[in-house]
Amino acid sequence: MMTNQIQTEHFTQALYELLDETFDNVHGIFLDKGTSLFETLATITAVEASIPVGGQCATLAAQVKHIAFYLDVLEKGVRSGQFERQDWGKIWRETAVVTPGEWEAAKLALRESYNRTKQLIADTAVWPSEQQIGGAIATIVHTAYHLGEIRQALCTLKNKT
């Protein structure tokens, strides 16, 4: 039986382009111009980042910290080969009001986590399993989901003012 395989460099290049669109530079793959995560976060003040959106929803600051936490857990797990149990709810419980300095620090921490994720991909010469490929794709999907939540919440906040 003949199998078709994706060349690693093709997969990695597509992954980089999707990550870049999600976080930094819209290429028109699935986002509209000016709506990447960091472009969106640049328009949000610390006051706006501190407002819980909806009755049971977390603040925008919690969303940002959650994305960074997700990226950090993924990177640590892939590099060590050990995926330890995590308290995924901690950030949602503990992140509420942020000062302007804390908001800037949260965005910087996210940028650093994102840069480590890109380095992890660069360090991955072979994608040997569906689990690794799925994890890489899940990074984009997970972040895009939270980007959608952030953008929807921001729209709601801006319409209230």
Image (tube, grey):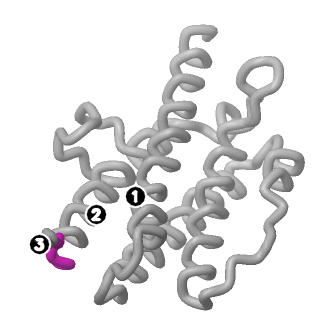
Q: Are marks 2 and 3 in contact (CB under 8 Å)?
A: no
- Quick one: SS at disc 2? helix
Q: Earlier in the sequence, mark 1 or mark 3?
A: 3
- Quick one: SS at disc 1? helix
Name which residue lies at 55% across and 34% down: 150
Q: Amino acid at mark 2?
A: Leu
Nearest the viewer among 130 and 73 is: 130
Q: Quadrant of the N terminus?
A: bottom left
Nearest the viewer among 93 and 10 is: 10
Name which residue lies at 69% across and 57% down: 101
The disc placed on residue 145 is none
Q: Are marks 1 and 2 in contact (CB under 8 Å)?
A: yes
Q: Earlier in the sequence, mark 1 or mark 2?
A: 2
Q: Toward which corner of the image does residue 16 lie, by quadrant?
A: bottom left
| Residue where numbered disc 2 is placed | 15
Q: Amino acid at mark 3?
A: Met
Q: Position of residue 106 (x, y in %)?
A: 64, 58
Q: Is residue 7 magenta?
A: yes
Residue reaching furthest top?
A: 160
Q: Position of residue 56 (x, y in %)?
A: 82, 25
> Looking at the picture, does residue 151 appear above or below residue 37?
above
| Residue where numbered disc 3 is placed | 2
| Residue where numbered disc 1 is placed | 137
Magenta residues (range): 5-9
What number of labels is visible?
3
Q: Marks 2 and 3, Cα distance to the nearest angstrom?
A: 26 Å
Left or right, 12 with reference to 143: left
Nearest the viewer among 14 and 23 is: 14
Packing grade of label 3 (10 A; few <14, some 14-19, many >=20) is few
Q: Marks 1 and 2, Cα distance to the nearest angstrom?
A: 7 Å
Left or right, 72 with reference to 30: right
